[in-house]
Image: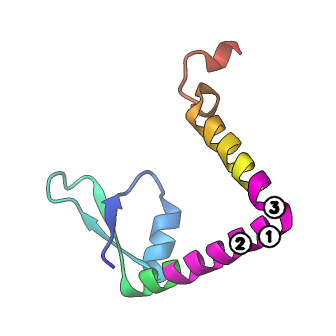
Amino acid sequence: MTSSWIAPRWGATSFRWSSDGLIAIEPMASDRRSKELHLTKAGDKRFQAAREGWIKAQTRFESAFGSKRTTELRELLRAVVASEFADPASPDRATN
């Protein structure tokens, strides 16, 4: 898997991941002031292991909490994320 994305302001975290060999940091071709992060083979291996763990955890949660309640919880959480409440840049946030 080859992944790349524009690096937000991750600072020390992205450099630690780079020194651990999980990502490669390169200047962007279009704007050399910006950086592009690429997942390395080691990073992809770590990502896949984490993904497998995440899937197992979600399965265990659903087994314990129930399929219907899990679905309802996820829908509520999606609604929170989609709302203005979740947007710290929202102009209404300061007045609420």
| Crowding at mark 1 (Cα within 10 Å: few <14, some 14-19, many 20+) | few
Residue visible at 81% across and 61% down?
66
Q: Nearer the viewer, residue 92 or 73?
A: 73
Check disc 2 and give the amino acid type. Answer: Thr
Farthest front residue in view: 68
Identify the residue at image location x=43%, y=76%.
18
Q: Is residue 83 left or right of residue 61?
A: left
Residue at 30 percent across and 62 percent down: it is 36
Residue 73: in sight, yes or no?
A: yes
Does 88 sit left or right of 59 as displayed? left
Circle 1/circle 2 CB separation < 8 Å: yes
Please provide percent x and percent y for residue 39: 37, 75
State which quarter of the image contains the C terminus.
top right
Q: Which residue is mark 1?
A: 63
Q: Answer whether residue 72 is magenta in the image.
A: no
Which residue is under mark 2? 59
